[in-house]
Image (cartoon, rainbow, N blue to C red):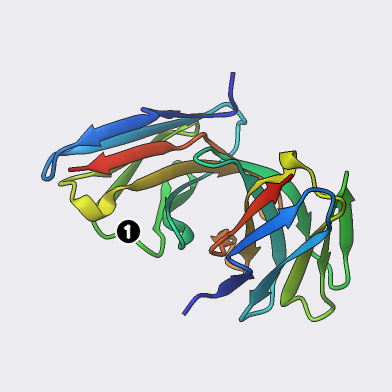
């Protein structure tokens, strides 16, 4: 079974609309990382969350870590074509390795 | 120059051949990782190294080996490539626990 589940697996959103991607862990998270990947390219770091209830924003992207530190959500406001790609959450379960979820493929349509 | 450089970027090889993927980083970090990415499976950890003398297996190490030649270099080898090793391979480096990992651009490997 997957330790880190992302939902949805894929998302098609009209430009200008808001969207949310979820990342759920079967274990307590010591650190939760969000990355973005352009198709077939490397990963770009977005943000990292460590404390329960923590929320961070970067431009129009906001990420939250719940109080129990087992779920994170990534919210994009007023989506743009540049937001298209694959979003991956990565978790540190206290073993100092980065374990990734299965990814969410985001498509923005005009 | 990129922080993490992978070579080659693309490679097609035949079943049974030995192949090496190379990774070098200019961040000065001790920790380096190799991942593979398959559609629908996200990134899975193959091997990781916390310093030059430390090598650890990840979740899918069978069929792979690694060498940490220096702090900046971490290579991945497929001793006898098989078709189900066709994937996108990523190298990454990080400084210490709780910090951002930097990724290379990936190596697309096809085994025919």
Q: Quadrant of the C terminus of chain B?
A: top left
Please indicate whether residue A71 sits to the left or right of residue B80 in the image: right
Q: Position of residue B58 (x, y in %)?
A: 41, 61
Residue B41 visible to the viewer: yes
The structure residue drawn at horizontal position 87% and vertical position 48%, both measured from the top left corner, is: A60
**Position above or below: B28 against B76:** above
The structure residue drawn at horizontal position 35% and vertical position 48%, both measured from the top left corner, is: B87
Q: Position of residue A10 (x, y in %)?
A: 60, 62
In this view of the protein, which residue sits in the foreground, A109 or B8?
Answer: A109
Q: Position of residue A51 (x, y in %)?
A: 83, 68
Residue B95 visible to the viewer: no
Residue ranking furthest to the front: A110
In this view of the protein, which residue sits in the foreground, B110 or A46?
Answer: B110
Residue ranking furthest to the top: B1
Total tally of numbered discs in the picture: 1
The picture quadrant where one finds residue A76 is bottom right
Q: Chain of mark 1?
A: B
Other-residue count near label 1 (Cα within 10 Å), few / some / many at <14 / 14–19 / ≥20: some
Residue ranking furthest to the left: B16
The structure residue drawn at horizontal position 18% and vertical position 51%, both measured from the top left corner, is: B82
Q: Which residue is mark 1?
A: B61
**Position above or below: A19 against A25:** above
- Please tell me whether mark 1 sits on a helix, a strand or a loop: loop
Q: Quadrant of the N terminus of chain B?
A: top right
């Amino acid at each position: 079974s997957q330790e880190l589940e992302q939902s949805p697996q894929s998302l098609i959103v009209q430009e200008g609309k808001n969207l949310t991607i979820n990342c759920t862990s079967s274990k307590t998270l010591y650190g939760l990382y969000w990355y973005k990947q352009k198709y077939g390219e490397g990963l770009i770091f977005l943000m990292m969350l460590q404390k329960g209830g923590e929320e961070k924003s970067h431009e129009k992207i906001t990420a939250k870590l719940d109080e129990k530190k087992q779920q994170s959500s990534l919210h994009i406001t007023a989506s743009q074509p540049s937001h298209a790609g694959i979003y991956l959450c990565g978790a540190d379960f206290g073993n100092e390795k980065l374990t990734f979820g299965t990814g969410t493929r985001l498509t923005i349509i005009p | 120059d990129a922080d993490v450089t992978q070579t080659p970027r693309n490679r097609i090889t035949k079943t049974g051949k030995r192949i090496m993927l190379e990774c070098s980083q200019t961040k000065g970090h001790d920790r380096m990782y190799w991942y593979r990415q398959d559609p629908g499976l996200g990134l899975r950890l193959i091997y990781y190294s916390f310093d030059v003398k430390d090598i650890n297996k990840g979740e899918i190490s069978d069929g792979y080996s690694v060498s940490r030649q220096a702090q900046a270099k971490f290579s991945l080898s497929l001793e006898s490539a098989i078709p189900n090793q066709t994937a996108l391979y990523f190298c990454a480096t990080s400084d210490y626990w709780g910090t951002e990992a930097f990724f290379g651009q990936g190596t697309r490997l096809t085994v025919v």
